Image (cartoon, coloured by chain):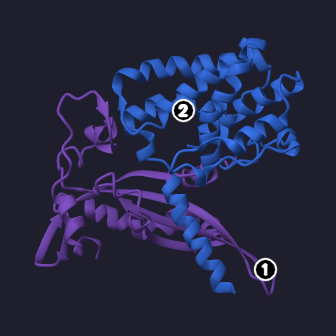
Chain colours: A blue, B purple
Amino acid sequence: MHIILEGCLSRTLYFVIRYFLANSIFPLEDVNSFILNFNYGYSEPKDKPAPITVNDLSSPSNKLGQTPAQIWLFSRVFALFGELFTHHCPDVWRVLPTILEITGICLNRKISVNIIGYLKGLIKENLQLFKDVFGENVTPKQHYPIHAPSQILKFGPLTRAWAMRFEAKHQQFKKFLFFERT
Amino acid sequence: MLLNNRIILDMVAKPNASEPNSSLLCDFANGTLVQTHELISGDHQSLKIVLYYDDVGITNEQTRRKHKRSMFYFQLTNLYKGFRSKLKSIYLLGSAEHQYVKRYGMDAILAPFVEELKDLGRDTGVYIHVQGGVVRLRGALLAVIADTPAAQLLGSFKESV
């Protein structure tokens, strides 16, 4: 799911925040203060987003200094913060709800077959909006979600076939190797 | 050895049946791959294996020499979906130095696994000794999961972004 969490979603958030900061719509300190003081749910504090630094906003990796789980949570809470400022630039803000909807559908545990066609249209709309609004190139990671609808039909919900748990198992072995050395 | 566990054996024996004509995709079994698979669509008790491949970089603290090891893991998707997120349900299939993977090729490294898959895929299947007796099971590799560079190496594609 890095194609979304570290790809589309992360890159969209990166450019939206950069746009708002560049046009002095809100300062970075307000975003970080919101992140720190938000009332997260019971199971959410472990994935609480990290404060965004100025370096994160100029880094080529577009990840805002967050892990994929942090990006996922941040995308959901940032909409609550940014919605107050959307009247300043509604075109820029329009990119965010499409990617949030794509993320919501793709990361669902149960997906209706009837929504696959809608998802295809949504991904196309998101990529077109991204190019029109920000004028930035689409990265390979942003291209891969185009294949997500056909893969959902083939394999079922992508959360059943993602690499996240396998990567966690892999981390266990990495830690084991670390302790072996010491 | 896995199937010695009664709970796992029960899950293989009694797969969660999806509702017929349901338009809701909940698991691998609802996807077209499983429904059109020659072996799995006919035998609901077949073992459905998923393979994962990734590399790990190790640095020897004393000599500062760097090694890269390729690790292969597998999981049975017969397990009910709630159990598959447990790290205990993912098993190490094997590991090899990455330099040997590059030198001899992925085919040579995975050859023993492929032979075992061929045995599982035969009409007669494989006899497995479990607690209380012997079961005859068939199975197939359902999918291979890997990140982009690992997937490119596995599929013999050119390594790129």
Q: Residue furthest left?
A: B133
**Inter-mark Cα distance, 1 to 2:** 41 Å
What residue does disc 1 label? B65
Q: Quick one: B11 or B99, which is closer to the camera?
A: B11
Which residue occupies 41% across, 57% down?
A: B85
State the mark number for residue A103: 2
Indicate which label's residue lies in the foreground, 1 or 2.
Answer: 2
A102 displayed left or right of A154? right
Residue B28 drawn at (x, y percent): 33, 44
Is residue A154 visible from the viewing direction of this image?
yes
Q: Is residue A79 left or right of residue B135?
A: right
- Residue B71 quadrant: bottom right
From the image, which quarter does the N terminus of chain A lie in?
top right
Vertical placement of residue A160 versus B54, above or below: above
Marks 1 and 2: same chain? no
Q: Position of residue B133 (x, y in %)?
A: 10, 77
Chain letter belonging to callout 1 = B
Name the chain under label 2: A
Amino acid at circle 2: Thr
- The three-letter code of the residue at mark 1 reads Arg
Disc 2 residue crowd, few under 14, some 14–19, many 20+, Cα 10 Å: some
Kindly identify the residue that appears in the image at 73 percent across and 43 percent down.
A63
